[in-house]
Image (cartoon, coloured by chain):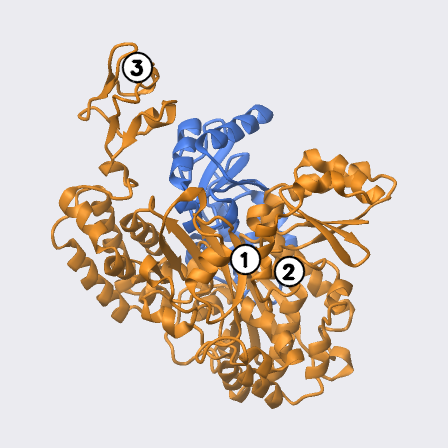
Amino acid sequence: MKLVFGEGSCGIAAGARKVRAAVEKLNADGAVGIGITGCIGMCYLEPIVDVYDGDTLVKRLVKVDEAAATALYEAAKTGDLAPLAKYEISADDKEFLEKQTRIALRHCGLIDPEDIAAYEAVDGYKAIRKVLTMTPEDVIAEIKVSGLAGRGGAGFPTWFKWNAARNAKGDQKYLICNADEGDPGAFMDRAVIESDPHSLIEGMLIAAYAIGATKAFVYVRAEYPLAIVRLEKALAAAKRAGLLGENILGSGFSCDIRIKAGAGAFVCGEETALIESLEGNRGMPRLKPPFPAEKGYTQAPSNINNVETFANVAWIILNGGAAFAAMGTETSKGTKVFALTGKIKRGGLVEIPMGLTLRDVIFGIGGGIRDGGTFKAVQMGGPSGGCIPEHLLDTLIDYKALGATGAIMGSGGMVVMDSHTCMVNMARFFLDFTAKESCGKCVHCRIGTKRMHEILTRITEGKGKEGDVELLQELCNGIKAGALCGLGQTAPNPVLTTIRYFRDEYDAHIREARCPAHECAALKKFEIDPAKCKGCTMCAKKCPVGAISGELKKPHTIDQTKCIKCGQCVATCKFGAVEVK
Amino acid sequence: MCECCEKSDLSKLTPVFEAFAGDDHALISILQKAQDIYGYLPTDVLYAIAEKTGNSPAKVLGVATFYTQFRLKPVGKNLILLCKGTACHVNGADSIEKALVEELGVGDGETTDDGIFSIKTVACLGCCSLSPVMMINEDTYGSLTPAKAKEIVRKIREASK
């Protein structure tokens, strides 16, 4: 039998490599086959080990630790899997995958990402072979039929961009893959590159053929070292197989793909900033038009798509654009991958057909809120998106429907929040991010986000004033209208949506100096419940400012004038007697 | 040329310049390689890169300060990258930062006096399901609590002595 370890970044962080090393140590005789795969997307169950008999998956084991090494080895050697029963995935958890429809992630967690033969065994590189017998126009037409739209966030029709780049005048054209996945809370692209790098390469080759590009770049975040390593290996293997470089498969079509590692700048996810960065400059966006299709990298016609977009391309070519378009809604076709995180029971990667509701994803697949909490909002689209409240949970996952809520589809980050998350502080958090990441080129964004962050900080500190919300709205509108690029234009979205749906929280902070979620430190009030306090004196001993007093075995009290709201008393009390109000 | 205290062995840059010879757009890649070699970007190295690539020192410094990956000061033996992405924020990254500051006595962007640790907060490490998360050198530590974070750095400090 063979043991296959899930070694995406999450799996490795959870200890997958340590477990594998422990099994390999026992397996000096090679009695057990050992392999790796990428990320299956069930991050909350990592490390995951799959047991295969030949090509058949016989058992999926979850939360496997080093202590299980001997049991794993023995079971795989003898074929008696009964001792592994306690690690077996539950029926509930199986649903997480069963309810999904996977296209972009079709091979993730199933094949060895470091072995080109494994990709070829699942119809890999068949699409490019087919494409090389088609005309570029036919390829673009097929993509048009599919209705594929840019998965990086903007949702622009992919065929249109390809067509524009194809028709642009220029001897040298470039294809660029945007793998600068900067939205905090999003990791779909990382998973695709780590788990199925060849599908990205194949998608890029098809696009390059369609637009007539002979040089291509993948711009990968520096924070994704494993993705870079696996992509390097995959590119080398593709080159050896004659699938990359000069005269691909004897067709006369040539294309080379190079990796460029980003150096850490959120704004470089914006296409013209990314091009500046590729050229070795500060990543500051350019004025559009001219669009990259006309004047992109080194002023030559260029086309930029995101990783997930490319990951769909080979499937569309093999299965037909109509099969892709058959899924989804009128305005949004196919599937979309989401990174489901936050206060969710089952967090990980979820790929579903467009047109399901947010509730289907968060409660149906994600299992709802963890630790028995109550759902409050879901943040979509990262710093460019917005927070969607409970009463809109039946909103369809569709570019238009999500846009109408004030949030956006975005690249696929879906961060779930419960009643302990303060929405004003959430808005402050995002503005802190955008203010730091603003490149500084336009005044509206550079100074506007800073002023907004200051106002939001003031409110979370209990120093808010009447009129602050209106001032924030005025700034939001100014920044939206005046900023040059997507970063600035969308930076106000988290503020606008939290004001729209959680105005009561803003008012509570400003008018009552109260944080309804009990999150903002300055507005917290600690009190001891005399009925629960045993008078053990532990909290009084721990309090760094001596604000707690009381006699032994009698209820203690907190002097509010001395309290610095550090929370030590809450952490110390064994009886749950300290209440946060 | 700057006459400050930094005197780096510039001969180490030769293979880097050779690897990127003829590529006019390689400034960021060259800075990345230089940082791999020296651990940070010393001023004299920046000047050398400017001269060799035909850029003004102002442009090279401009690029080096634009991207968060580049450091103009040396870092400690162990670099702690504390994730403050959205998922980590929702799951309590602030309390982890507080715990690290308490334990190490230094904050974001600083290095401990003994040179064992530097702390840097980052926007997202992409391990959101394990949040809150920190990365120390190549290892990722997930599902942190303030106590767990303190214990991890204590163990590394013991091992570094």
Q: Dot 1 surroundings within 10 Å: few (below 14), some, or many (20 or more)?
A: many
Foreground label between 1 and 3? 3
Sequence-earlier tag: 2 or 1: 2
Q: How many marks?
A: 3
Relative to B137, does residue A138 appear above or below in the rendering?
below
Q: Dot 2 surroundings within 10 Å: few (below 14), some, or many (20 or more)?
A: many
Foreground label between 2 and 3? 3
Label pair 1/3, CB-CB below 8 angstroms: no
Question: Which element type, helix, strand or loop, lies under badge 3?
Answer: loop
Q: Which residue, given by chain and number where applicable, does mark 1 sit on?
A: A349
Sequence-earlier tag: 2 or 3: 2
Question: Which residue type does callout 3 highlight?
Answer: Gly
Q: Are marks 2 and 1 on the same chain?
A: yes
Q: Which residue, given by chain and number where applicable, does mark 3 sit on?
A: A535
For marks 2 and 3, give the CA distance. 56 Å
Q: Which residue, given by chain and number where applicable, does mark 2 sit on?
A: A108
Relative to B153, does residue A439 appear above or below in the rendering?
below
A328 left or right, relative to A498: right
